[in-house]
Amino acid sequence: MNDLFGFTRTVVKPSYALLTPDGFVGSQLPGWRNCTVVVNISPAMGAQFVQLQITFGTGGTGAGQTDDTELFVYVLEGKCTGNIGGKKASLVAGSYVFLPPETEFQFDGAAVGTKLLVFQKPFEPLAGAGKLSPIIGQQKKIPGRPFLGNDKARLQVLLPDQPEFDLAVNIFTYQPGATLPFVESHIMEHGLLMLAGQGIYRLDADWHPVKAGDVIWMAPYCPQWFVAMGDTPASYIYYKDVNRAPLGI
Ligand code: UGY
Ligand code: MN
């Protein structure tokens, strides 16, 4: 809730959206029992992927099948058990799982309030490549490497950087004052959740103060830049489509 009636930092435009938690509206989705789902980003706003936040209530469970999509699930808070294509995993804050197409899944045993961040994308197979396998990982085991030589802006790459993957999910951590080195404008789309700290995000020709909890969608070619501000590091997790030629060559 905002203190000031009729005010929000949320903006939704054709080339980007900034969505702040005061405007989030929960819904129920099939397969997710006793869970509240906020659909932050979806094709309804022009995106080509989906970004969800799912909060488990008492006895909450999630079960389904990825079909021809792929899912990336990151535990924001709490703990639960994941059953991913027959593999069991204990998941805690910072754990993540990648579910390739045609994978059955179940999340249960969740502490009340456990919160998942989910990215879902239609999978674009690579000709000649084998089937992708599920991945279970931990953010703390992934090294944070300096981004383009800047050790004050570090990037953790959570999925293998290999051509058979058509998505990337990374975590960027900036020391106060560190920036993206230039205003990027690229064909890849982003879905982003601020995990900690605050800063200023340039989106298209606008500059927005942002902080932990905010969600951002950036359409292809949306000019983008970030500077971390304040006394503590800022970090965000983000999705990106990668490794596929627009017209297939
Ligand atoms: O991977 C990226 O495109 C990243 N540098 N973009 C961003 O943080 N807005
Ligand atoms: Mn980018």
Image: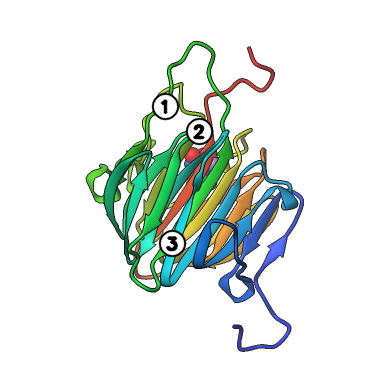
Location of residue 177 in the rendering, given as x and y in whole percent from the top left corner: 41, 59
Circle 1 SS class: loop
Along the horizontal axis of the image, is 95 left or right of 205?
left
Q: Earlier in the sequence, mark 3 or mark 1?
A: 3
Name the spot of residue 54 as percent of width and height, x first.
49, 62
In the image, 230: left or right of 47?
left
- Left/right placement of residue 189 relative to residue 87 reads right
| Disc 2 + disc 1, Cβ < 8 Å | yes
Residue at 61%, 40% in the rendered image: 189
The local secondary structure at tag 2 comes to: loop
The answer to whether the residues at label 3 and label 1 have Cβ atoms under 8 Å apart is no
Q: Tell me the residue that label 3 is attached to.
A: 61
Q: Which mark is residue 101?
A: 2
Q: Which residue is mark 1?
A: 132
Q: Amino acid at mark 1?
A: Leu
Residues marked 2 and 3 touching at CB (< 8 Å): no
Q: Nearer the viewer, mark 3 or mark 1?
A: 3
Q: Position of residue 159 (x, y in %)?
A: 38, 36
Where on the picture, by quarter, is residue 151? top left
Q: Residue at x 68, y 57 (%)?
A: 206
Question: How many marks can you see?
Answer: 3
